[in-house]
Image (spheres, rainbow, N blue to C red):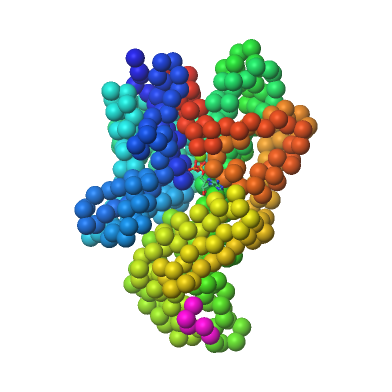
Amino acid sequence: MTSTFCGLDFGTSNSTIGLMQAQKAQLVPVEGADVTIPSTLFFDFEENQAHFGRDAIATYMEGGEGRMMRSLKSILGTSTMEESTMIGSQRKPFTAVLGLFISHLKAKAEQQAGKELTHVVMGRPVHFIDGDEDADLKAQTTLQEIAMDAGFQQVEFEYEPVAAARDYAQTVSDEEIALIIDIGGGTSDFTILRVDGQTKGSKQDILANTGIHVGGTDFDRWLSLARVMPHLGYQSEMLKEGRLMPVGYYHDLATWQKINFLYDHKTRADLRHLRREAKKPQLIDRLIELLDLREGHRLALGVEEGKIALSEKLSARIDLGFIEQKLKAEMDRTDLIMALDDGVSRIRATIGGALEQAQVRAEQIGVVFLTGGSTRVPFVRQSLLGMVPGARIIEGDVFGSVGTGLVLEANHRFG
Ligand SMILES: Nc1ncnc2c1ncn2[C@@H]1O[C@H](COP(=O)(O)OP(=O)(O)OP(=O)(O)O)[C@@H](O)[C@H]1O
Ligand SMILES: [Mg+2]
């Protein structure tokens, strides 16, 4: 017997949806047998259809005509959300694009449940937008409206790290103070809670929630600007003394959700003009070539792959042969550490804020529970764990803990 509620983790990079099945919170297969799906859409202009997840990435990489979209969660709460985007010859509001993705997940879960799902607890970061409560509320309201439009009748929210805490608390046997660390694609979120072993975490005492809009997609951007964009003219000199190439193009190209904005005619016309004023026009030609080929996402995927490779290896190489024969970008762990240093300091400060809010000292943290793909970056991990040297480390389900916790939360509220 399954119920009519679910938990839905709409992530910047990956999403999950889950149900209570046989009295257990279980994530649903959403792409083949996989219970996670990249939060990615590709609108195929040739077939006039939308592809989702890994299939979207593969179809884009095959080189078909179409529009690739990723990291759409990052535009919630920003003015871009009110805009629309060209999909072939049609204009589609961003809300409708997000709606397609949420509907796709809902349909997968309904297939599994064998019935319509009416109630959902969705995850949300502690801050969609840093330091702007109005924009933050707007982000949540927009996501709620999108979910209602997708057919849910009741849409509630829970902080993502609190959901992860619920997943963690299922297994606790002693009373202890836990720090939940969730470093995802878009945000880094923290919860400090006291868990009570006897009640198996059902009586959770949340002491603090903090978060910052820094995550793996920012790591991609900083690494790209440091090691890849210079090959395309970033920070290169202009003929006019003391002038450098304008930086905006490179920042957009290194930012997942902004790549498509560079494919307009004006940008290309401006760049053709700028190349004539550049000391090394051949570098700007590479940028123009990349945009002509609409390969911005291929580049971003390459950078992300390079970053992920650096979690295992000391150096990585990104093949840029699709822009110019034999072109490649090389990077090592030191490059990554330098690119991430400032962002990681801000993440550490946010953990410091959580300790302050909870009024606990670092030594009182008995256990750290890690989730989110970006906890796999060794430098990030070491820097953060260094703040609580005495704590036991528990590895959560990197891509699934938040989703599982949301199902438990939905069961608590609607079950
Ligand atoms: N082995 C790895 N090494 C480094 N980074 C990784 C690794 N695996 C995944 N990542 C990064 O983790 C991020 C995705 O993590 P996750 O799926 O937890 O995020 P999300 O839940 O979609 O985002 P958010 O919760 O912030 O909205 C991506 O930036 C990805 O590049
Ligand atoms: Mg997440």
Magenta span: helix, strand or loop, mainly?
Answer: helix
| Residue with the most extreme left position | 47
Task: Left or right? Give the position of 365 relative to 261.
Answer: right
The answer to whether residue 221 is above or below residue 390 is below
Residue 166 found in image quarter: top right
Q: Position of residue 175 (x, y in %)?
A: 69, 18
Q: Quadrant of the C terminus?
A: top left
The residue shown at (34%, 14%) is 1
Task: Left or right? Give the position of 125 relative to 118.
Answer: right
Q: Position of residue 323 (x, y in %)?
A: 42, 70
The residue shown at (34%, 42%) is 101
The front one of 406 and 357 is 406
Q: Tell me if I can see residue 244 in this picture.
A: yes
Task: Left or right? Give the position of 412 relative to 375.
Answer: left
The front one of 177 and 312 is 312
Q: Is residue 319 magenta?
A: no
The answer to whether residue 208 is above or below residue 85 is above
Q: Position of residue 226 (x, y in %)?
A: 59, 65
Residue 164 found in image quarter: top right
Q: Which residues are magenta?
A: 279-283
The answer to whether residue 383 is above or below residue 285 is above
